[in-house]
Image (spheres, rainbow, N blue to C red):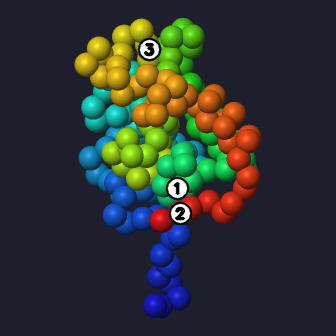
Amino acid sequence: MANNESKPRKDLDESCVFCLIAHNRDEVTTVIKQDQELVCFSDIYPAAPHHYLVVPREHILSCRSLNRRNIDLVERMAKFGKEVLCEQGITDLKDVRLGFHQPPFISVDHLHLHVLAPASQISSYMEYKFTPGTDRFISEEFLRKRLGKVSSPAIKKF
């Protein structure tokens, strides 16, 4: 490999659609907001009038791959999602739902926070997928509390 060629990134899985979006390599998805660490875009199957996904640029498999060292990441993802809601005109942040699907109930093996608003308008057809406290879906607050009780093994990437 020539010196001027970029080396493969450890934080990018070429087979992961969310990695491609997070690294601006997907020509179809419109990114709503991004910074050096996080990217936000609309869910392709929205369950509420505002349904966004916040993903880290780093490829992390799921919320089960996290530990207490990642509590700040989860907090930053939630804050980022709330900022997007505010920028999209959502003023009632009490009527939002932020959470993660847990394996085996994830469709893409890349950590992603669902940001839904208004939560009171989540489609009855999709409500079962976004009910907090189930094995399928946990709130970001619940995940932070759970991570506070977990020891710190290495993050599982790829």
- Judged left or right of residue 81, residue 114 is left
Residue drawn at the location 39% of the way across and 46% of the way down: 104
Q: Which residue is mark 3?
A: 119
Residue drawn at the location 61% of the way across and 36% of the way down: 143
Quadrant in which residue 83 is drawn = top right
Q: CA distance from mark 3 to mark 2?
A: 31 Å
- Judged left or right of residue 138, residue 73 is right
Give the class, few, some or many, for how many residues have Cα within 10 Å of label 1's Cα (few <14, many ≥20): many
Three-letter amino acid code at disc 2?
Lys
Q: Secondary structure at mark 2?
A: loop
Residue drawn at the location 46% of the way across and 41% of the way down: 102
Three-letter amino acid code at disc 3?
Ala
52 over 118 or under it: above or below: below
- Across and down, in percent, residue 16 comes to 37, 58
Quadrant in which residue 155 is drawn = bottom right
- Judged left or right of residue 95, residue 13 is left
Q: Which residue is mark 1?
A: 60
Q: Which residue is mark 2?
A: 157
Q: Is residue 10 visible?
A: yes
Q: CA distance from mark 2 to mark 1?
A: 5 Å
